Structures are given as C-alpha cells and as structure tokens.
Amino acid sequence: MDVPAPVLRMSGIGKQFPGVRALDGVDLRLLPGEVHALMGENGAGKSTLIKVLTGVHPADSGTIELAGRTVSFAGPLEAQQAGISTVYQEVNLCANLSVAENIFIGREPRRRGRIDWKRMRARAAELLERLELDVDVSAPLSSYSLALQQMVAIARAIDVEARVLILDEPTSSLDAGEVRQLFRVMRRLKEEGIAILFVSHFLDQIYEISDRMTILRNGRLVGEYLTRELSQVALVAKMIGQELAELERLHGEARTFDRPLVEARELGRTGAVEPFSLTIHEGEVVGLAGLLGSGRTEIARLLFGADHATSGEVAVGGAPAALRTPRAAMARRIAFCSENRKRDGLIPDLTVRENIVLALQATRGWTRPVPRDQQDELVGRYVKALKISPANPDHLVRDLSGGNQQKVLLARWLILEPRLLILDEPTRGIDVGAKAEIQRLVAELSDGGMAVLFISAELEEVLRLSHRVGVLRDRRLVADLPNDDTLTTDTLMETIASGGRA
Amino acid sequence: MRRLLWPLLVLAALLAVNLFFTPSFFSVEMKEGHLYGSLIDILRFGAPLILVSLGMTLVIATGGIDLSVGSVVAISGALACLRISEDGGVLSAVVLALGLCVLLGLWNGFLVAGVGIQPIIATLILMVAGRGLAQLITDGQIITVNSPSFKVIGGGYLLTVPFGILLVLVVLGVTAFLTRRLALGVLIESVGGNAEASRLAGIRSRGIVITVYAFAALCAGVAGLMIASNVSSADGNNAGLWIELDAILAVVIGGTSLAGGRFSLGGTVLGALIIQTLTTTIYSVGVPPETTLLVKALVVAAVCLVQSPKFRDKVFRRAGPRASSRPAAEEKVRVTA
Amino acid sequence: GGGGGGSGSGGGDGSITMGFSQVGAESGWRTANTKSVQESAKAAGITLKFSDAQQKQENQIKAIRSYIQQKVDVIAFSPVVESGWDTVLKEAKNAKIPVILTDRAVDSKDTSLYKTFLGSDFVEEGRKAGKWLVEQYKDAKDPVNIVELQGTTGSAPANDRKAGFQEVVGADPKFRIVASQTGDFTRAKGKEVMEAFLKANPDIDVLYAHNDDMGLGAIEAIEGAGKVPGKDIKIITVDAVHDGMQALADGKINYIVECSPLLGPQLMDLAKKVVKNESVPARVVTEETTFTQEQAKTALPSRKY
Amino acid sequence: MTTAILDRLGARGRSVPAKYVPVLVTAGLFVAMFVAGGIRYEGFATGQVVLNVFIDNAFLLVVAVGMTFVILTGGIDLSVGSVVALSTMISASLMAGPGWPPYLVVPLVLLIGSALGLVMGYIVHAFDIQPFIVTLAGMFLARGLCYTIGTDSIPIEDPTFTAFAQTRIDLFADLWISPSVVIAVVVVLVAAYVLHYTRLGRTVYATGGSEQSALLMGLPVGRTKVAVYTISGFCSALGGVLLSFYMLSGYGLHAVGMELDAIAAVVIGGTLLTGGSGFLLGTVLGVLVLGLIQTVLSFEGTLSSWWTKIFIGLLLFVFILLQRLFSARRRI
Ligand SMILES: Nc1ncnc2c1ncn2[C@@H]1O[C@H](COP(=O)(O)OP(=O)(O)OP(=O)(O)O)[C@@H](O)[C@H]1O
Ligand SMILES: Nc1ncnc2c1ncn2[C@@H]1O[C@H](COP(=O)(O)OP(=O)(O)OP(=O)(O)O)[C@@H](O)[C@H]1O
Ligand SMILES: [Mg+2]
Ligand SMILES: [Mg+2]
C-alpha cells in the first residue's frame, strides 16, 4: 500500500517538566488527506505533544519536519503562519471580545488598512451558519456557554487556510448534533488534502472519523496503527495497558423513590430558563438531556444558588429554602460541579490537595482548618480512586493535564458527601478508564442515598446512570421521562427534536 | 523556599557593599543596655515598612491593592498623639487610634467587596481624604508628645531588643498563624486566584476581602504608632508619605504577584528588608541626594532581573554549553498559508 | 457662600477680594503661613479665596486662571517653583489683576508681571547659618566635620539654604561637609538619616539642618547614640518653630535662623496698596532674625507657632 | 437628569450594549456635576470653564491615553510622571544651555520617551517581570536623571517655544483654547482609531482579556506588549512637551504623582485595571472629571488645605458610587 509523504513528521520528541517527564522519544507523522487520532489516557502527553509542535513549549529533544524541512516554531504565531491551525484543549479565546472578533482576530478583513467591522461580522455569521449555529456574533463571547465557545474556537481554526489542522478534544462538551457538523467539516477539509490531528476520549467518534492513530502511554509512544485494523478493545488495552471490563447500564433494577429531597416549583430566571418544576428524590439520579444552549446548565445553577431565580421557589427536604448564594445551597448540603473548570472551578495557582479540600474548608470556615491527616486521607483516597496523575497532591493544578484537572474538580465535590450532587458535564475530557470509574462512583453514592442531578452531552452516559431523564429544549423543561427499557438514545433524540409533544 | 533564594542573595550583596564602605557595619554592641548597630537600625527603621507590607501582602493576594495605607499611618499617629497630648492616657489613645484604623479598613473593604469598586480607586479615595483627615486631626501642625510609655512602641527597648522589632515579630507570627496554621491563607489565595470559582466553592469571599483590608489598615495603624512614637510626634502631613509604594514594591520583590493568588509572607519581609537596607546603604555610603534615585533604580532593576528565571536563562546559561536541540533560525521555513 | 466675590475689577465698594494660592500643607511651617494669611485677611476685611495646590505647579496655575475667571481684585501666591509663570501671569496682567508673590520668588525676566515680592531670602538664611558657624570656630585649628540634612531634593529652600551655607563655610578649608543627605524636611527622616551618619562618620562636630523638624529628629538619633546634642555635636537649624525654639532653649540646638511664616499682615497691607494703585517696593523682605540659646529663652513664651 | 437618561437606557433594554453603559453613565454624571457646579457657583457654567479644564489638563489627557493602552493589556506604567518631568527637564536644559532650537529638541524628547518605554516594555515581555516593578524602576531612573541634569528649575525662554506656548486659538464668542488642547484632541482621536480600527488595537484588548489565550490564538502578544509601553513612553514624553508649554520651565519635581492621576483617570473612566475592557472616551471623561473636581475646589475657594483633600475624596467617592450604582448590571 502506498503511503503519501507526510506533511508533518515529529521524531524523538522529549519534554521534561519539573518533576514530570511528559514526553519521551515520541514520533508522530501526519499524512495529507487523513484524520489522525492521537490517543492516550489523561496525562499521557497528547496536549504536550501538540504544544511542543506549535512552539508553546520548546522541545528538549527531537526534530520536527514540515513538508520535508526542519522547523522550530518560537510560538503559535509562527506555527500558524507556517500553515498549522490549532484548537487547543481548553477553550483559549478572549471572553471579553465579541464572537466575530474571536474568530477573526489577527486576520481581520481590512479595507485601506482599517478593520472592516461590517464585513467581519457578516463573514463570522456566515461561517457559524455553516456549522448550523445561529448566534449574535457581536455579543461578547463570555455571554455564551462553554459548548458554544468550543464551536467558535473550531470555527476560528477551520477558517484558516492551513495544511495541518489540530483539534485537541474539540468535542468534549459538544452534543451529537454539533459533533456531526464538525465531522462534516472535517471530511470536507480532508478531501482538500489537509492533514488533521484529532484528540478525543470518545472512542465512537474516533472510529467514525479517523483513518490512523498514534497511541501514547505515560509520555511514551506505543505505536501507530490504522484505525480499521485495531479493535476498540485492543485500543483501550494499548492505552491503559490492561483490559477494560465492558460497560453496562449501572442501575439495573427499577426502584421507587418516595422521599423528595429537592422540589423546584415554577423556578425560572428571565432570559435564561423558563419556569420549571422538578423533584429530585433521595437516592435518585436525574439526568438532563438537551441540545447545546438548551438551558441545562442554567437549571443546575439555579438549584445551587449560583444565579438568582426570578420566579418560583425551592424546597429542600420539605422546608422552603431561599437559595440565594452557593453557600446557602451548601448549607443544605447541595453541591455543584460546574462544567467550565477553568472559569468556574479550579484555582490554578493552588495545589491538587488545596483544590480538593477547598469546598470542605469553605463549609468549615477559616478558623477550623481541615486537619492534615484528614486531608491526606481524603486526597489520597480520591487521587487513587480517580487515578489522578501525577499522584502528587502538592502539584499545582495549573500544571495538570485537562482530564486530571477535571478529576480534581470532581473530587472536590465528592468528598463533601452532599445530599444532592449536581454534576454538569463531570466527565468532560476524561479518558475511558476513569470515566467508568466515575460512573461507578456516582452509582454507588446514589445507592447510598445521595441524589444526583447529572448533566452530560453524551446521551449514552445519561442513560446509563439515570433513573429519570428530564429533557430540555429552548430553555424549557419539556419532558420528564422514567428511564426504563423503552428509553434509548434514539427516543431521547426524538423527544428533544419534537419538544416533547410526540 | 527556593523562591526566596534570589531575594536573599540580593540582600546579602547589599550588606556586603556596606561592609566594604563601613567596616564596622556588622558590629552590634551594647550601649546603655540596648543593642546598637547598623543592622539593628535596619530592622528598627524597617519595622513600620514590614508591618505595612504584611497587610499589603494579604490585600494583594486577594487580587486587590491598598493605596490608603500611607494615610492610615498618618491618621493613626495623629490621633494617638492628639489623645496623649490632651489627657495622657497612652493605652486608651492606642486603642482609639487602632480602632479608627480598623474602621477605615472596613470602609475600604466595604467599597471593594460590598459596592464592587475597583480596589485601586476605592482606596485612592481614602488615600486622598485620609491625608486630609490626618491634617485635620493635627491641625496641620506637628503634635509633639512627651510620654515615655508611648515612646516605647517605636523607640523603646525590651530585654535589650528594640520594641518595634519584637512587635513586628509578634505581628508576623500572628499573621503566619492565621494564614498558614488556620485556613485563612488558602481561602485568601483562592479568592485572589479565581474569584468566581471561589464563590461557587462556597467561600465567603466578601467577608474575607473585608477582613483583609481591615487587617491591612490595622497593620498600617500599628506602623503609624511606631513612626509617631519613634520621633515622639505626629506629622499628619508627611508621616507615611509614599509608604504604599514601598510596601507594594516589597510585596512584589517578595515574589507575590500583583494579579493575586499565591503569597509569601517571608518573601515580603525580605523585600521590605531589601528596601530598608538599600535606604540605609545610600545614607551611609554617602550617595548624593541627586543620584539616590538612580541607585534605587539600578538596584530595583537588578533585583527583578535576577529574580526572573527567563533572564537567568538568557544571561547565565548563554555562556555555558547548551545542548541546542533547536535548529538555527535561518533553517526556519515560512510556508505561506 | 455663593460666589459673591466677583465684584468686578473696580474696588469701588471698598471690599477687596484676594485670590491666594498656597503651595500645599507639607509642613507645620506652611500651615502657620496659611493661618497667618487667613487670619489677617479676616482682620483686614479682605475676602479671601484660598486654594491649596498640593505641591503641584499645574494646580497653582489652574487656581490662578480660575481667579482670573472669577475676576478677583488681587492675586497672591507662593510659587511652588521659580520658573514657568510667565504665561499665566501675562493672562493676569491682561486682565488687569495685580499679582503679589509671597514666600518664594519667580525667575521671570519681565518684572512687570507682578507688583511685588514679599518673602524670606533662603540664600541669606543659609549664609546666616554659615556665618554663625565660622564665628564659633574662628579659633579652632582642627578641621570641623559638618553633616548636612537637606530639605526635599530640588525644592527651592533646600537648594538655596545649601548654597548660602556653602558659600560662607566653603571659604575656609577647615570646614568639611563630610556627609550631606536629604531628610525631606521631616523628623522621621531626619532621625533615620542621622542614625546612618553617626555610624558611618564617628567624628561629627556640627549638624546643619535645613529646618527645625529634621534637626529635632536628628537630636533623638544623637541621644540614642549616647552623645549630647548641643555639646558633642553642635546643631544649627532654620525656621524657629515652637518645638525648635524649645529645644534651643533647652540647649539641644545651638542656633536657629528664623524664617517667619507670619507674612499675613504685611501681605494684606501690600494688597490694599496695590489695589488702590499706590506704589510699593519691588521687594519686601520679611523681618527675620536669628536666635541663640539665650535669646530663645526670652522669646519662647511669646512664640505663637 | 442622569436618572432620566438611565431610565431611557433601561427602557430600551438591549439596544445599548452592556459594554457602553459605564461610559455613558460616566458621561451623564459628568454633565450632572457640571450642572450642579453651575447652580452652586456664579460664573461656573460657562463654556470657557469647560475649555479651561481641557487647557489645564491637556498634558494629563495625553499621558492618560498612553496609560489606557498599557492598562488595557493588563499592565501598568508607573514611570509616566517621571518621564514627563524628564521631558520638561531635557527640553529646558537643551534650549537654555546649548540653545538648541525647539524643532530639534521636541523630536529628541519624544524619541527618548519612546525609547524608555520600549526598554521597559522589552524587559516586561522578555523576562516576564511584573510591569509594576519594571516601571517603578523606570520611574526612579527618569526622576533620578532629572536630578542629575539639575535640581533647580530651568526657565524656557526660547522665543519660538514661548510664542507657541502662549498662542491662543480663539473660537467663537470669546472662547479660546491653547494649541496643546488641539494636540491632545488629535492624540485622542488617533489613539481611538488605533484601538478600534487596527490590529494592534484589537490585540491590545485580546492580550488584556487573556494573555495566554491571545498567545495561543497566534497573536503577536510580545510585540504588542512592547508596543503599548512604547506608546505610553511616547505619550508621556509628549505630555512632557505639553507641560513645558504650560509651565515654560523644566523641573525635576514636576508631575510628581502624575502616574496616579493618570491611572485614576483611566480607571474612573470605566477601564478595568485587570485589562481587556474599557474605552478611550472613558479615559477622556476620567481626566475631565478630575479636572472638574479641581475647578469646583477653586470656585469653592474657602476650603483649608485639609478640607480640600477630604473634599476631593468625597467628590470622588460620590462620583464613583453613583457610577457604580447606575451601571451595575441588574442581576437579581
Ligand atoms: N506546564 C506544565 N508544567 C508541568 N507539568 C506539565 C505541564 N503541562 C503538562 N504537564 C504534565 O505533563 C503530562 C502530560 O500532560 P498532557 O496535558 O500532555 O496530557 P494529555 O495527554 O493531554 O491528557 P488529557 O487527556 O487529560 O488532556 C501530565 O502529567 C501533566 O501533569
Ligand atoms: N445556540 C445558541 N444560541 C444562542 N445562545 C446560546 C446558544 N447556545 C448557548 N447559548 C447561551 O448559552 C447560555 C447557557 O446555556 P446553558 O449553558 O444553560 O446550556 P446547556 O444546556 O448547558 O448547553 P451547553 O452547556 O451544552 O451549552 C444560554 O443562556 C445562552 O445564552
Ligand atoms: Mg490534553
Ligand atoms: Mg451546559
């Protein structure tokens, strides 16, 4: 079989961070007209490899060849100029600028040297329309949800005329529809002969779109394979170094829930979510399904007191509760793990340990520090259970890989052992092994009596965990379905599409 | 601790310069039952700055800044001296002055955390008005007091050691205890590192911010008492003038970022000592006043350069053999997109 | 009071409005000066518009402009600096508002821009200090080691007091200024700098401080070093504020050159004359004296500031 | 009347984008303050009083424009006041001593200011040092250079220079402005254009929004950071030249604390000190507000020195408080 000459070849790449060997002799080649998946567990070194390529981090060793010539980029700007367009893992856009600017900044359409705002907005709207998004491009990016921001980042990257496109977990908070749009675009680009590097922890997506894959483990190269020649099981085995048990629906038998924990009556917030009523019982896992921007996050924030409701009321354990601040909610033992770990979750300058015990510490107040041995015990337990790596509690969270940061955030809320745990996209960017572990943990906790509100863009996951699924559409709770055998992702999709009238 | 290495080296270098010009610089002797010497002087005159910087450190760690400390220094000294000159009760005067300072700090904190005004402007208000207040208290004159017990705070000795130094040690100890032993430090760093995330983690950031401003004002108040007591007089016009700048500088030299987040009390103390040593050095080496600022500029530049890992990389390692994995610049390809 | 002061330029109704722009409130001396102006204006029946420039020349220029705008009858001000007044003074002249300088001079070539200058001569003060010193040590054979505490770097009194002193003592090589540093006119700095001087120069005979406050601070440092101020180290200062006079009477200071802030009454007299278009001398030097320890003891009880 | 404007703003709801609200509120408050002054003081509400605010603050305006660039990137420049002083000092000494002509001196001064800014910007960028400390060193350096030139004030007597400085540009009806005002207005317009219509300007905002993101988006962050400090250095030098027009003297103690005035003006104008958000128009308003406070004080005319300060603080407080209350996004 003939293989065309690679556009990009990295060989023998090594990168050492203080205390962590992130990459060690890694090779990677990208062929034109192919989607190449970069696979590996959380912390395997995928993002680091990408950052070394685009010059964010200088490599310690190894060479990079672009179109047969040795290159070394001093920064993303140079990489971009050389035709490498990148979407980095965390959404790296400027929230203070408008959507249109975020797409075009650095290459704005100009007329006689001055930025042509009108044309820029028009082109941005056009570009987003091609991704089937209808947004006000002159509004600041900060007014949009994380998923939309991810789409904007993608729009920015694919509009560049590039020979190499790099997408580092672009789909982590996208739902099926958006993923389909993205794949459509990727196929088109592929046909144009562009080499695409794609990172994702969703194996289905990998098998759907990629032609070839490179697998990393602990910063070392495992090998390069053709996707169609490697089974999912084999892939996982190569990634984590062992076999993974099959995933099953975690809540086998149907249970009845009769002790309401949190009851929301006509709770709503103007401009965010229409008044809705929802009851969550003790021990129950309620999933929320809906499209991008359908208001799932808004519901979660209202139930946690992160935003003020403009109508309706909440009762917790039968007593009316004014959830005006997160503290008030936490006092009633409600916890909320937010979807945007960078903006609403982690304190990047603090260590893993400090981030994990932060919420617990907050409930105790500053005069009663969490005793050191209790800290060690809690942190140690969750570092192990969630496989946080590096397993050093005194590592700065800022320096962790994306998935591991997510685990830290999750651990923060799990140790609180709340009565209601609201999880908004808790498995965003988490690898298959850890994901199963987290799902098992959630199921275990709910069996122990904890109520969970579970939000995820991945419908399978929602179905696997929930006892009941609320469906949102256009910021309205349109259906509340029990999760029995008749409920499948297809019926869910239908409900979403029809707005619950079917 | 490795972070403090470079400031320590700078401090050592400054002291070495002194030793070169004044061979007796390191000598500490007993005079009339107290310790006496240049090193003691540095600690003694640096004490107010260290105090103000400690308060400033916490404020900066929350992502704020406090410009009003200089005015608070003046107010505290002025009020205490006024009270003492009126009826002589030192203790009540001190309590009153510090009480007012805490109130002023709460006011700052309220503007920042309650009303949501940007810290620099919120505290600018008190910086300007507070100086006026201090002058109002002293009527623009210098209030001289003659109270031996008041004199102790800034100019006295306890067990041969200057009382001011002991006071600093106590405040430092208390601050370290509150922030590092108790959980205040982590919460402050968390608020400064990511305010929204802290709110969602259930931290009462408003209360913490207000507390921190009150603490900074209290520290400034104690410093004000020290300065006033040291010269037995309150000068509403000049006491604490520009001390906010020195304090911020001390904090920054100590490695705390003005953007908030992680802070280092030890670094701040070192920073303040560097500044004070520099001042003393300038006096004792005999730098003419016209060039004082040039020397200061050089030292500050040197301190910040030597602390910068990037600078050390570029300058110190360039000479050494560096395994260059990067191809030379001319090999770079520019591919037109 | 709603600005009833702008009674037009004619002083026909007899009431005079004066705009007075003060440098700031940087020292007790300055405050006494402000008070004196305010009190004597009241006593003289002159409406005073007062503004504090907070040590900024631009604020003074603004204030003078606004006085012109408000059509006051006479403008008086203590310039922050000597240079840079021509433009605004021309505006005043065009608006036919007479200007009186107080305390400090301006270096404008065009002397028609102001009517008169009332104030002290800082250089002369420096000379007076120097002359006393020369007189004191006229029999001494050994070199005399002098340390100097300067005022705020760049300020006119600091520059002039230094220059005047230097002019006199510089004539005799036995006077050696071994250290000279700014003490910013404050007690705290005076003390701090003196402590450093004492350690770096074991053998100091004389301290010359540009104002009393720095001298007072330095006295504390000298006492802390176990020496006797006024005996082991002779001290000369300028200003003669109350605390300084007290120290002089107590024998801790040896000599004070007066620099009187009480310009108010003289200023009001001049203002009245100027408004009536009477001729005034181009330079009015304030009546100032010097004090020795004995003179201080007699003068102290009647000292107002 | 401010409330009326705001009510209308509120009524129209989304038609005024949230980002303009602070600037509009500031403008409304400024007008309100001016009207209040006019009611309280005779001769206050005249056109010339407003123009005087411009005339007396032209240099501050120029300096604050440079500061706006720096603050928008999330930095700070403490050296501006000293660079202003240094500029007056160099201008005066070169014209007084060797008798250089102004058309040589002024470009030289602007060059020196820009070069100082460039060096500071380079250090901030290349060595990753906090701008506060770098520009503080710059502040000491420039001030120190002033004193090494001389501690006395130096009058400027060059005929061309003084003639220009004393030119009055007559407008209609007895109103006049100085050439400095024209220069300042031009600077503001150019700067507004740069910020809004050029890549450099937009990169300034992006850098302030998130430096790391801007870097990853492939924006020339380093170059931009160096550029803003250079711009600020240039503006400070130009401000210094305007100040020499105003004062006709060079002096090492000129513009002490001006950095704080400039920062205050920028922040009062609604720009966030953390960067990324704010408008140049806000800065203009901030300067005007500070100037108007001074004018109010001189019209008040009866305040003692300390009440002056307390009064400034109070006015500032009331202004900021109202600004904050009116523009607070009504998050219920
Ligand atoms: N700036 C940094 N400083 C120190 N260590 C780092 C830094 N960036 C990454 N690391 C470490 O390098 C390793 C590889 O991280 P990387 O982000 O490349 O993982 P990844 O494969 O992208 O994982 P994920 O799937 O979670 O995104 C991790 O152990 C991480 O802690
Ligand atoms: N397609 C869109 N068009 C307009 N606004 C949108 C869109 N998507 C998201 N938003 C904005 O994002 C905000 C957040 O929505 P929310 O986060 O509740 O949605 P979600 O259901 O959690 O979906 P996701 O988190 O996947 O975006 C909404 O208030 C809305 O303003
Ligand atoms: Mg990654
Ligand atoms: Mg969401």
Image (cartoon, coloured by chain):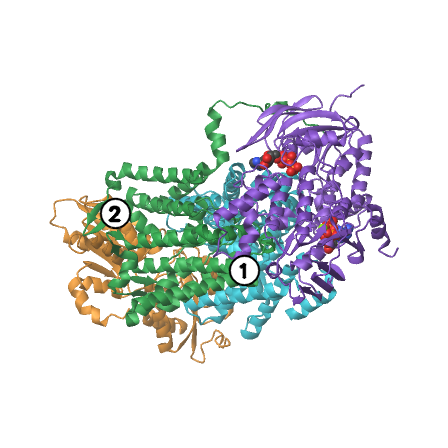
Chain colours: A purple, B green, C orange, D cyan
Q: Amino acid at mark 2?
A: Phe
Q: Is residue A180 positioned above or below C61 on the image? A: above
Q: Which of the pair B15/D252 is nearer the observer?
A: B15
Q: Is residue A451 left or right of residue B203?
A: right
Q: Residue at x 77, y 44 (%)?
A: A460
Badge 1 crowding class, 10 Å Cα cut-off, few under 14, some 14 to 19, many 20 or more, is some
Whole-angstrom CA distance, mark 1 to mark 2, is 48 Å
Q: Which of the pair B119/D304 is nearer the observer?
A: B119
Q: Position of residue B216 (x, y in %)?
A: 44, 57
Q: Is residue C287 left or right of residue C26?
A: left
Q: Amino acid at mark 1?
A: Arg
Q: Which residue does the numbered mark 2 point to in the structure image? A: C197
Q: Is residue B337 positioned above or below B178 on the image? A: above
The secondary structure type at the circle numbered 2 is helix
Farthest residue in the right direction? Answer: A502
The quadrant the C terminus of chain C occupies is bottom left
User: In which chain is the residue bearing label 1?
Assistant: B
Q: Which of the pair D85/A176 is nearer the observer?
A: A176
User: In which chain is the residue bearing label 2?
Assistant: C
Q: Residue at x 54, y 60 (%)?
A: B206
Badge 2 crowding class, 10 Å Cα cut-off, few under 14, some 14 to 19, many 20 or more, is many
Q: Which residue does the numbered mark 1 point to in the structure image? A: B206
